[in-house]
Amino acid sequence: MSQKVKSFSDIEKLVFEKVKSNRIYRAALVAPSDVQTLEAVVLAKDHGIIEPFFIGDEKLLIEKATKYDIDIDGIEVLDINEPKLALETALKMGELGEIDFIIKGKIETRQFLDFLYSDELNFSPKKSASHVAVYKIDSYPKPLFLTDSFVNTQLDLKKKMMLIQNAVKFAAKLSVNNPKTAILGAVEVVYPQMAATVDAAVLSKMNERRQIKNCQLDGPLSLDIALDSYAAEAKGITDSAVAGDADILVAPDIETANGVYKAMSTFAQAEIGGVIVGGIVPITINADCDSIENRYNSILLAILAVS
Amino acid sequence: MIEKIESADQLIEKAIEIAKVGRKKKIAVAAAQDPDVIDAVAQAVSQGFIDAILVGDKKLIESYASEKSAELSTMEIYDEQDPIKAAHIAVKLASEYQADAIMKGFLPTSALLKTVLDKRYNLRGKNTLSHCAVLDIPGYHKLLNFTDGGMVVAPDAEQKFQIIENALLVSKSFGMSPVKVALSGPYMTPDANNPHTVYDKEVIVPRVQKELKDVHIEANISFDLATVGNSSLKKKYNSELIGDTDIFVSNSIEECNIVAKSLIQSIGTVFAGVIVGAKVPVSLVSRSDTVKNKKAAIAISCLLADYYQTNHIWSDDRCLKK
């Protein structure tokens, strides 16, 4: 399929095709008592794209499923109360190829990440994992990739290179090749006192010299200029391949990407989802305010992320 | 009288109310030869919520005004072609109580602010200057005062405190009491790998609670919980701020700038900015702002100036004008 992906229903079609030509994917929901995530998982199962597997507190799971009338019949449960152990078990199964990806359930994100990066779990020994979100808003003609809303803090140039590579690789799985990649800033010129603008300029040069490959990259770009060609023109940015037509948005820090993710998921009512890529297995993470549909979207993205 | 201002429309209504009770504000525009600025100022004048003094290249001002069909007859014009000199004249007017607020025209922001901070004019407050982006987000039940996406690049603990103190003035001028302040953090708990999430909670929150009045502040609140969260999330996190934040304090200039733009670009959020920290409000509008944004920005300057004057905020008694 080489057609352009324009919405999550196109993304869902890609998933259906992938399932059809390969197999149904095995997903472990860790700490499964989160009601909305549970509903999304059951939805994905009903659509025949995943075979779910629960790892967590079985008693609590049954309580919630009964209370909210969610049909979990026939889904296997591994009763492990301790969340870290549950996650460890899921990762081990991932390493052994027994599951394809992990869905985060009812564990605080910060704690979940601390577990992931603990020595025992060793999810990403080279620290080369990052979160990529995909969202579609009415005012922009194509889906946007946004990184990193949840995982990496204290971004230096090296980490930003890793985020870009992961996002570019993931975009290819949604048939977005040679993506236009915007390194975001508050302004579109380089100021020595604004580190984000200096990094963006360096990354642009690295792309020009083919040190960062498989994408067209430009920055610093402010968000309006990345997404709106009129705004770009008004600011005199006329020679950028990326301005006004970005596919990937690389935020300068986790707070920015996190805030955009949440603003889009809530007020903008975007179709949105996201997945951690670059680790042992893909892992979905969702925000408190994400709807069931958006949690389902994350599952779709995780299936596409599975190699 | 409007007690609490919760939308962009109410900003303008309130500014009109203030004018009607005899406290109409006068705005000095520095280097006013800017068609969009002239247009916005003329509209605010004709709606009756400001008087204006245009300082700048008179010829250009008049030609832009006729281009925009803007009515200049009730405005004073000081002819000064040089933008920097014009900035000095506008700032001096404010310094001599002839103007209540300053507005940027056709000159670099940095040049105007340098003039505002010039000690000769005695307009410096004790804090750093910071920018408040006041957002009227469709779907949010009140205005969100998002700061700082325009001035302080990466605030340290002291600057963040001053940014909060500045932003409180703006939200108080909207009638908010107590003002609910959220310090942004991607997770709801401090993260040792991300220093600000720790010092926000351990240094800034206690200091604000101790030194500033009529404020409810919490650290490590993410954007969705600050603005949307429902009652079950309120319970889960045991926080007063869930879904009801007045001021959202970002951790970097990029965070505020980019998140605000994402809301402006996607769903037509009304945006109005003001620079706070000097003894008079400084208002900036940009070309990309809609007319509504620009008028709302001017209205904020009026409200803030009125709040300063009626509450005797500055010790040299700037409230006793003229």
Image: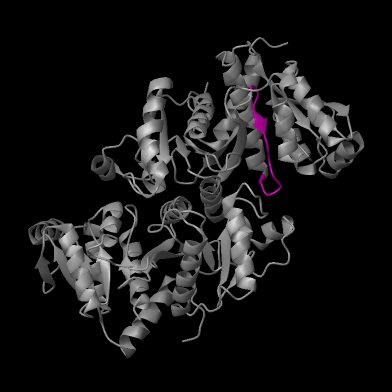
Q: Is residue A92 above or below residue B31?
A: below
- Is A277 on the left-hand or right-hand side of A185? left
Residue B84 falls left or right of residue A133: right
Provide the major secondary structure of the magenta segment.
loop
Instruction: Give the color scheme: rainbow, by chain, secondary structure or one colour.
Output: one colour
Residue B293 colored magenta? Answer: no
Q: Which residues are magenta?
A: B279-290
x then y, percent, for residue B110:
71, 38
In screen coordinates, is A220 left or right of B3? right
- Judge by depth and name the residue closer to the eye, A126 or B271: A126
Q: Residue at x 26, y 53 (%)?
A: A111
- Quadrant position of residue B113: top right
Residue A37, by quadrant, is bottom left
In x, y percent, where is residue B292? 64, 41
Q: Is residue B207 visible?
A: yes
Q: On the rendered image, what quadrant is the C terminus of chain B found in? A: top right
x and y, in percent, of residue A112 in the image: 27, 57
Q: Which residue is depicted at the point 62% across and 58% down?
A: A221
Look at 64% across and 51% down and name the residue there. A187
Please name the residue shown 41% across and 75% down the image: A11
